[in-house]
Amino acid sequence: MLSLLMPSRVEIVEPFTRVRSFDDDAAPDGIELLLQAVNSLDNPGLMVVGDIQVELYEHVPASGDRKGARVERWNVPLSTAEHQRTYWNQVTQMYEFRLTVDTKALPVDAKYVLLVTYNSPLGEHLTDECIITRRSTALPLGGARRSGR
């Protein structure tokens, strides 16, 4: 019964994960990442405790390992009630992270690999990744997905 309460995977929610502006101007400030945890019955909307590590890599085309040089890294703790209130959206039943990045350092129309790792307090690690493209406007990111467990 406990396994039904524990996540069996984490998923980057596309197309809602995107480059966007976090203030009133049109210039993008970073990546808005929507993430959900899913249990073994494929039910999303689980809250998790632990840490989320997000990494942004250059994309390497035509390669078995699509990740090139790391561009940015963020660590987000989800260990306290305050952390949960900050990132959990009760309406969507997903975590929403605003990850600030110098978008001037990201060439327009270049591809990147966004990798998310959930580290549970029990030592379990769940990952998901997708290829994203920084567009000339703050449109939703899209691309291929590859998950790992």
Image (tube, rainbow, N blue to C red):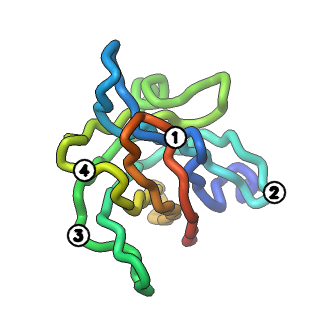
Question: Label 1, on which residue?
Answer: 140
Q: Amino acid at mark 2?
A: Leu
Q: Amino acid at mark 1?
A: Pro
Question: Label 4, on which residue?
Answer: 106
Q: Upstream in the sequence, badge 1 or badge 3?
A: 3
Q: Say which quadrant the C terminus sits in.
A: bottom right
Residue nearest the observer in this picture, 5 or 39: 39
Residue 68, image quadrant: bottom left
Q: Amino acid at mark 4?
A: Leu
Q: Amino acid at mark 3?
A: Ala
Instruction: Give the number of the disc on residue 127.
Output: none
Residue 120 visible in this rendered orientation of the protein: yes
Q: Secondary structure at mark 2?
A: loop
Q: In 3D space, how far apart are the residues under numbered discs 4 and 3 (Cα atoms)?
A: 13 Å
Q: Upstream in the sequence, badge 2 or badge 4?
A: 2
Question: Label 2, on which residue?
Answer: 41
- Residue 70 horizontal side relative to residue 124, left or right: left
Q: Secondary structure at mark 3?
A: strand
* Callouts 2 and 1 close, C-beta under 8 Å: no
Q: In 3D space, how far apart are the residues under numbered discs 2 and 4 (Cα atoms)?
A: 38 Å
Residue 91 placement (x, y as % from top left): 67, 23
Question: Label 3, on which residue?
Answer: 69
